[in-house]
Amino acid sequence: MYKNKLLKMRHLIWMNGWYFLGATMALLLAILMDFVTPILLGETVDRFLLGGESTLPAWANAFVDRIGGPEWVRRNLWSVGLCIVLASLLSGAFYFIKSRLSSVACESIGVYLRDQLYTRIQKLPYHYHVKSEAGDLIQRCTSDVETMRTFLGDEILEIISSLFTIFVALVYLLQENVSLTLWCLCLTPALFLFAWLFFNWVSKSFAAADEADGLMNAVLQENLTGVRVVRAFGRQKFEVDKFDRASKDLRNKSFNMSKLLAVYWSGSELIGRVQILITLILCVIYVVRGELTLGGMIVFTTYINTVLWPIRQMGGILSDAGKSSVAMNRIREILTQPIEPEEKDALTPPLDGDIVFDHVTFGYDGGRIVMNDMNFTIPAGKTTAILGATGCGKSSLVHLLQRLYDVEKGKGTVSIGGVDIRSIDRKYLRTRVGLVLQENFLYSRTLKENIAIAVPDATDEMIDRAVTDACAKDFILKSDKGFDTVVGERGVTLSGGQKQRIAIARTLIKDSDILIFDDSLSAVDTETDAAIRKALKERSKNVTTLIISHRVTTLSQADHILVMEDGRITQQGSHDELVKQPGLYSRIFNIQSSQESSPPAPPQGC
Amino acid sequence: MSQLQEKDFTQKFNLSLFKKLFFHARESWGDLARLAVCMLLVALADVIFPLLTSYTIDHFITPGTLSGMTPFVIAYLVTMTVHISATFGFQYFASRIEADVCYAIRKKGFRKLQELPFSYYDTTPVGYLMSRLTSDTQSLGSMIGWVLIDLIWSVLMLIFTAAAMFALNWKLALIILVVIPPLALVSAWFQKRMLPTERSIRKLLSRITGSFNEGIMGAKTTKTLAREDKNAEEFNVIIRDLKHAAVRSTTLSCLYMPIIISIGAMATAYVLWRGGHQVLTGVLTVGVLQAFINYTMQVFEPIRAIAATFSQMQSTQAAGERVLSLLETEPDIADTPEVIAAFGDQMHPKKENWPEIKGDIDFEHVDFKYKDGTQVLSDFNLHVNAGETIALVGPTGAGKSTVVNLVCRFYEATSGVIKIDGEDLRTRSQLWLQSHLGYVLQEPRLFSGTIMENIRYGRLDATDEEVMEAARLVNAETFILKMEKGYHTDVGEGGSRLSTGEKQLISFARALLSNPRIFILDEATSSVDTQTEQIIQHAITKVLEGRTSFIIAHRLSTVRNADRILVIEGGKIAEMGDHDALMAKRGAYWRLYTNQFMEEQSMEVLGGLSQTPKKNF
């Protein structure tokens, strides 16, 4: 498991291998360049100012001799200055290249992960979304991705940078003076250890602060959403006290966490400063004894400074590494969910035939059976209405017709025009079968875009006709910006009935072979219901239409009526036939018609 | 979205805003002073360290002696101790300031939110209010705590460094100071350009979160529309935009550091050149040269920090403006000073002065308009006797909820008077009124905590026995005792672990416990099974007994039991009377009734009320 996890992170790095490689190379060069300035300074002091021996490699000395020897340099010290500026420019250039490359790499990782997650989530089967928790999913897609991105993009290079700095310094210093080097680095293991132990030790108090933050948020949210209850009971003082407790707790816990961090920063500084003092004293002793030059001392003290402070950051980075592997796992959990299989040889037959349920038995996830050996035919090009009690299997029927769920093999078949629905391409089926549910989701866009969502090239006339038929035109024109009103999360909230009508319009606008209305006229009043059905009849004459409803006025006008009870079809026929039979239909009919001592309002326009 | 579009940036530096914020942080002024002292010590020690190195060169190495080492070590240890303690100190105080400022602003903000009327909540989404008191407040707190540190340190650092250099060698010092203006200019140039790109990244990030949100919440619909690929394509465009913006932004910030470091290197080179000559001519010691070089190597840091501080302040400015606008919003329904003097305010009620309440209610020529000008009630008149049950029926938007909201004084009438026991509501305190109200909402709202705590919300000093008594009266005890921990079962956030019906029963028990004189019921429209429905009906009758009540009714049985039924249409009372009288009229009520009756009966046969839309009743 652990191995596998690492493999996955590596996978992300491999994909941007060249960028990472380039960034690492540039980083190494930049670090090398950073070491040039202290060496040049040391050399200047030793050789040009104090007239001592050179510590530079042979090629550099050859160069010095070429331009006129130490004497020339002494008279023209600006030349050393120029070298320092050049080294700094080069180092800057390499740092720039490194940051640019690593930013491309880590942004590409971000794009990759987000894209994979989004696409995967879109393609996960229907039942996954029925059960999933949105808040948790969103957190995985946002903050976990962010954690991964910064870890792989910045923090890994940060670690490489620290390690390489230490390595280069060590190599240079060791060849200068082994015992001095060891003394000058004697406290670095302690610094490492301190960093490591500290961040392990405080992780609990970090978590406590996070938790307190979450708690305060929850109290705030509950108060704001429950503001009516608070006011109705006059509980403002109580709420203020409750929030005050949560907020005080957060204050204390986050202050506590910061205090610990202050301990860390000052504690590690103590180690570092003592190390620098040791370096200074020893260097002085070595120089006075003649075992080190003044220039050498300058190099030593400068290098020790460059090595020490990055180590302080390492503890934090290493503790983040733990977080990022948790994040990676959470992301992987989504990415390994099975998606709806793509069937290569799936059929795209015409869907204008009869829909036949043949001995269909169906239950969700092996649970309770909701359809039990169902046999019936929905005639092509006609309007079929379904009446059924709650939980009788009406919704399953809808799910099966769009292949949101499939009937298991051997538990009967659903076929359209004689073709088993399980062999029909899902996407094709869903594009050709228009479905309007009772609860509908509108996207956070304008009304116009929402209506044309499935038909991107819809003309204004098509949109106009669809909203007219769905009786949605009136309220759209009445709203603030008409068709350009933004709805959904970031926009205006529509009432249930308004949402239903928009959903109907967005289904009507596309050209479907089969139309299904799953109790989707329930939130509009009876008159609008009738008007929509009237428009529908004219609009989609030869479309197989399925209407699930409990309104007799709706049911009675269908060509064919099915009555479902407990996962079975108990009655079917026309309105006139069914009212004469004893059963659910006639009972409902009697209830609804007995109240109508006056004739129902004739269907009008909306 | 348009009206709620968050103003996230103002170009101009708003000094008065920072003054106000500073004033809001007045409890931390003491800490700020301590912080400043710490920063002074840190900067001082930062300037002394290079001098100590220089001392070792000039006093031990050049003369080649080790004598006088002890005073040096002591001086180093002292400087070190000062630096470390001051470092600890500034972190300590800065964190405390941050924590305290956040706490103080949250406290004020939350209190303000408890005072603001519903009309404010109607136009401001919860998410927006949440971020005022969470992320915005947080960034204000860290700005006051941490960002100012950088400013103090940088300025002091510059002053001390300059002082030290002038003391050592004023000619060399003068030349070094020449690099400061270009450093400042370059920093200003870059910061100005980096700020907008960072902002555009933040915007893109929140769009991505939004897209994920939609992609996840709307996944089922997307599936039925076979729109998965299209969604993914559109999403891909946004994340690619983000990538480009992010790479652009890092490009800019990656250029900045090398450039200012190189400017610093030029100063170092210059010092080496000029200073080197002076060493050769014996004017300068090697130690002093080394100190100068060290100073030039860190001179860019304070300038970078100052530039970063200003850009940070500029980006926090927007958060500051949003938080202040919340703190400065004046509630448009507020008790007058006289009322507060007589009856106390929300936090300090003077209950001893509160008059008894009987429950007679009068509406006299009441008009009500929303802020956007939509007229809801016009010349509304009504007298309700104490103890009477009034059912309000009529189409959505006719004004039923408004009537109720006006009784509770959640909204203020545009004109006209509402009286309780013959006294104008405005001459009584809001808390007095609300303490005598019972209110059960359409969507029952519970708070995190146990069932016991939730019921006790109705009367905080109720004993356990009284709580259980209330639960028993509404027949909620049966289901409560079935739960794992009985009354001590945790209901989850917002009551999420209970079903809607259960939540409703709890909210009835809660209302009953508070023993209100006036009771408001906005009847639920949805989703309970028949049995729960009967229990709820029973609970309603229990709760209504002997109280003046208003019911926004959706169910027939509730309406039939009311003393008086008001059919409200277009902000006026269209019909009024009891059930029999109104049925006999064969008017609006009769139509509503027959429709509703039909639906309810059918649904009963079909087994459950879960899909009954009840719009009118």
Image (cartoon, rainbow, N blue to C red):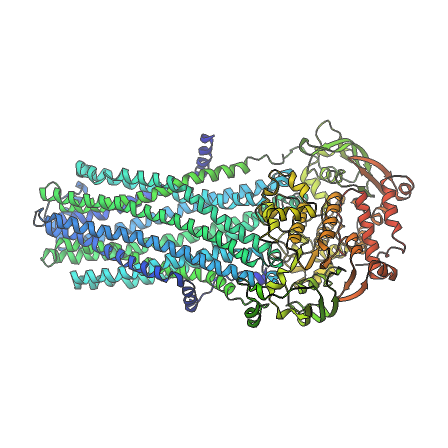
Residue B503 visible in this rendered orientation of the protein:
no
Is residue A431 shown left or right of residue A51?
A: right
Is residue B557 shown left or right of residue B95?
A: right
Residue B193 visible in this rendered orientation of the protein:
yes
| Place of residue B354 in the rendered image (x, y in percent of width and height, measured from the top left) | 60, 65
Which of A602 and A229 lies nearest the eye of the viewer? A229
| Place of residue B452 in the rendered image (x, y in percent of width and height, measured from the top left) | 60, 46
In which quadrant of the rendered image does the C terminus of chain B lie?
Answer: bottom right
Q: Quadrant of residue B564?
A: bottom right
Residue B448 versus residue B550 in the image, above or below: above
Is residue A92 shown left or right of residue B616?
A: left
How many dots with numbers? 0
Residue B124 versus residue A405 in the image, above or below: below
* Residue for point 73% across, 70% down: B378
| Place of residue B116 in the rendered image (x, y in percent of width and height, measured from the top left) | 57, 63
Which of A149 and B359 lies nearest the eye of the viewer? B359
| Place of residue B510 in the rendered image (x, y in percent of width and height, measured from the top left) | 64, 51
* Residue for point 45% across, 50% down: A249
In which quadrant of the rendered image does the N terminus of chain B lie?
Answer: bottom right
* Residue for point 67% across, 64% down: B407
